Amino acid sequence: MKILPMHHRYRHASKRPKWMLVLVCFIVFFLIFGYVYPPKNSSAFSDWLPPSGRREITDEELASQVLAKEILKTPLPPTKNPKIAFMFLTTGSLPFEKLWDKFFYCGTAVYFARGHEGKFSIYVHASQRKPVHESSYFVNSNIRSDKVIWGQISMIDAERRLLGNALKDPNNHHFVLLSDSCVPMHKFEYVYNFLMYSNLSYIDSFVDPGPHGNERFSQHMLPEIEKKDFRKGAQWFTLKRQHALIVISDTLYYSKFKNYCKPGFEGRNCYADEHYIPTLFNMIDPGAMSNWSVTHVDWSEHKWHPKSYRSQDVSYELLQNLTSIDEYMHETSNSWVRINAVSHWFSTSLSQLNTELLVKILQTVMDVKPCLWNGVKRPCYLFARKFYPETLEVMTQLFSNYTSA
């Protein structure tokens, strides 16, 4: 009997490994392509993959987390007269002390005898000259002060120093940081009720992917602080007592910003007062902060410093406009990069750009949200800056009018 050769059968079977090899090559190519050209809004191909297991935290992180949790669980000290601590960060005397005196004194007829004494306390940190006070409310308000350099960690040190002094009074339940160019936008009763009956700390905090935001992040902050947790915001906060305790007791995250967030470090200009507290509470207690500041500032001029108000700028209409704003906006530092790019593309100036086009560009990099107080939309701002000292008289004259409407 003739036996047929079997080589044809083996030839067909040998095709399968070739197809498998092609498939493997395709997968490898896909992985390499994905790593080199990651998807939009992704920093690396690893973002496509399922999240890996949590890393083991350091001893310092463990201690910090336990301390923060215990502080947040601690009830407020019992008191019949809870107070707001007004903390002024200044270089010397306060140019608007006369206006603040009116703010603390004016109110309903019940308070005319002694103003609102018993509902507030005042602390002044003067970094250059000892203040001369005109108002009786500011007597004995000066605390031990030290030199403060703009953009340096000494700004955070001054804030912590103010908080430490204010926390010595157990009746202080809310803490407001103000500058020497700040003015009140409402009467005392309004401010008191807004803060004391709120469950939030009013901390400005947002993600800025641009050159003046997340690009300031240093890898030296790892592993405790990751880039995804890095936040930016104005330094003018109001804090609940538990949050104030966390700020002055923190050493871990403070040291990261002290060492790795400073002007000129690694070729970047990082400013701790714009990032430390927003990042800290984004990591520790994100649900208990507002993400917007109750102190208004106008950055519409897109300069290194916000718009400043002169005497000729101040009017009843301006102040009414500021007190009626009920939405807050975060503009990232890459917005004007895009606008300038479009301006260059069309070979035109910013002022000549079509308004509709400009709005569309800005909408891609601006985040506008309503100001919610206990879930209800309300005007955003209790205070405003930057006002020149020359505006004192007109502000004092207008105070009763613009705060009564």
Image (cartoon, helix red, strand yellow):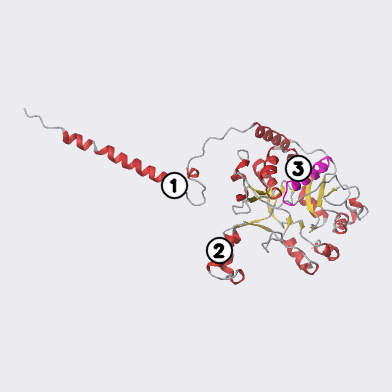
* Residue type indicated by callout 2: Ala
Q: Is residue 32 left or right of residue 14?
A: right
Nearer to us: label 1 or label 2? 2
- What residue does disc 1 label? 34
- Judged from the image, the secondary structure of the residue bearing numbered disc 2 is helix
Tell me the residue at 52%/48% (across/down). Answer: 43
In which quadrant will I find the N terminus? top left
Q: Residue at x 11, y 32 (%)?
A: 4
Question: Looking at the image, which residue is at 16% across and 36% down?
Answer: 8
Q: Which mark is residue 341?
A: 2
Which badge, 3 or 1, comes first in the chain's sequence? Answer: 1
Residue 283 in percent (x, y) is at 64, 42
Question: Mark 2–mark 3 contact, CB under 8 Å?
Answer: no
Q: Is residue 374 magenta?
A: no
**Can I make out residue 24 in this image?**
yes
Q: Where 232 falls versus 259 (above or below)? A: below
Badge 2, how many Cα within 10 Å: few under 14, some, many 20+?
few
Left or right: 16 as drawn, with respect to 86: left
Task: In the displayed orientation, state which residue is furthest to the left.
Answer: 1
